[in-house]
Amino acid sequence: MTTSLSGKGTRRTSRRFSYALPLFSIILLVLATSLFLIELLSFSQQEDSLPNDIFVAGVNVSGMTPAQAVREWEQALAQPITLYYEDSPILLDPSSIGFRPNSQTMLAEALASRDTEGSFWERFYNHLIDQDLQQSIEVPLFADYQQNLLDQFLSDISVRYNEASGSAGYDVQTLTTFSGQSGRTLNVPDAIRLIDNALRQPQDRTVVLPVNDAQSSRPDISTLGDLIIDYLDSQNFIYDGTDTIASVYVLDLQSGEEVNILGDVAFSAASTMKLGIMIDYFRYLNTPPSQEEAWLMANSLLCSLNASSNLLMQISGGGTDVLAGARNVTETIQYLGARNSYIAAPYVEVQGQAPQFTSVPDTNPNSNFSTDADPYLQVTAEDMGTLLTLVHDCATYGSGLITAYPNGEFTQNECRQMIELMSANNLLRLLQGGIPEDIRISHKNGWLDDMVGDAGIIYPPNGRNYVISVYLWERTDEGFQDFQRLWPLVEGISRATWNYFSPNEALLLDRVDLPPAAQECEGNYLPPNAQAVDLNDIDSWRTSN
């Protein structure tokens, strides 16, 4: 009985399990199917959005719908760009220059990026197993703008913010020239490049505009000319007046630029013509000058001794005819380009001596101004500058006089001897008084009752050599020259010119160490005798004893 009851109970339990297992399987299948459908539905919905880790035009639009993505990058790219012109901010609205991103093209490329992961079911399978094959996707910006509008925008900025450089100027008080104030200009080509780059960057929307320093206006030779005229005006000496005339010629021996203030007005040459006598005498010489000839030239050029000058002309004129020598001098200097200068009479050696003269050549000086010039002995500042330039070029480059007379009339050594001789003209005043002490100057001066002239070559340490020729004339009731009036003016013109060529060694004030009149030649800078004259080293006599 017991056994029978146990068997019946077992059969009922097995029947219950046999129904439960299929039911449980069905439930699991339904759940799996439901999960699959949910995942499929979710994945399908994700397929309507952009992939993860995708950047369009630098904007992260991962997982966004196309509409959201377009709105996102268009908003980012529409933000204004801040431009800085030095410390001044300027806003540039991209739409003001017609900037438009090509959203349709970029969206198409973004959507097409999904095809790189395979078919829909391959992508769904990878989704189910949580395997992400997607790498970061970068879709570049496609956009354009109107270049002419950007050009106009930058042109407006240039007008508003650029600063022109100031003009060069001068100071009459210190007789110096100076550069104008530096300006600033927008570098437009570089600015366009930087702005174009910023328009394509959604994050960095700031541009520091490239600004160049505008080259300041530097003083040129015309600035020096204006300074000289204003300086004379400040001293109540009208350069082109009725009773006062100033003639100034300056030549930059490096650049060839020049100042020419009434340089073609005729003046009495006085002793400055002795430069022409020396040049002609060297042309006359076929051999190196003897000690006696060198002595004559030293007395003529350094001490302005009229007798020595006349004797040099007499020798070159054949030995007895001083007028023939004067004609030779005129012929030589006019052939060299000094066409408004001449000597038609010897220098007067004794007061009251009966004058001798020869024919006066045709000349064409400036007829608008008269200095009551000596009818037999005339020169212009421009002509004197021309002669000095030819001597300088001959001595320095082997050209100048040698080129003008190519048949051996001049040698480079002869030209160096001319400059060496004139460098001993140490009268301490006039052109020499307007430059620092011990600066090399080779010059020849001269003056009469109503005029003063000085012409020379200056050799600054910086190598900017220049020729300067200055003549001043003033009509006076007294009939004699006021040395305290005209001489300081020559020195002021010389100082202004020195300061222009040597700005780093400028003389800001008049020199206070100048003697009241020119230093006497004899006993100071004239060699003591003929045997002491060395045209290759004119001051050698000082150290030979």
Image: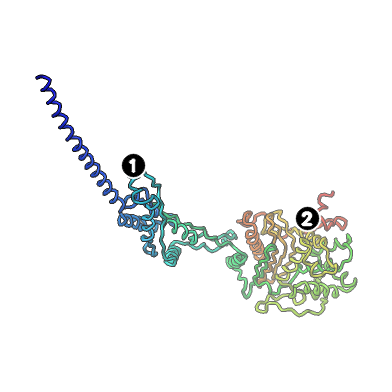
Task: Please identify the residue farthest to the left as the structure is shown.
Answer: 1
Q: CA distance from mark 1 to mark 2?
A: 113 Å
Vertically, is 5 above or below 55? above
First-in-chain label (1 vs 2): 1
At mark 1, the secondary structure is loop
192 vs 94, left or right, is right
162 vs 226, left or right, is left
Vertically, is 312 above or below 520? below
Q: Residue at x 38, y 65 (%)?
A: 98
Dividing the picture into quadrants, the one containing residue 403 is bottom right
Q: Position of residue 493 (x, y in %)?
A: 64, 63
Q: Position of residue 506 (x, y in %)?
A: 62, 56
Q: Residue at x 65, y 68 (%)?
A: 259
Q: Position of residue 510 (x, y in %)?
A: 63, 57
**Crowding near the residue tagged with mark 1, few <14, some 14–19, many ≥20 C-alpha atoms within 10 Å:** few
Q: Position of residue 280 (x, y in %)?
A: 82, 69
Task: Please identify the residue farthest to the top as the structure is shown.
Answer: 2
The amino acid beneath tag 2 is: Asn
Q: Which mark is residue 524?
A: 2
Callouts 1 and 2 close, C-beta under 8 Å: no
Dividing the picture into quadrants, the one containing residue 35 is top left
**Crowding near the residue tagged with mark 2, few <14, some 14–19, many ≥20 C-alpha atoms within 10 Å:** few
Q: Is residue 149 visible?
A: yes
Mark 1 lies on residue: 129
Vertically, is 196 above or below 19? below
How many marks are shown on the rendered structure? Answer: 2
Residue sitting nearer the eye, 187 or 331: 187
The amino acid beneath tag 1 is: Ile
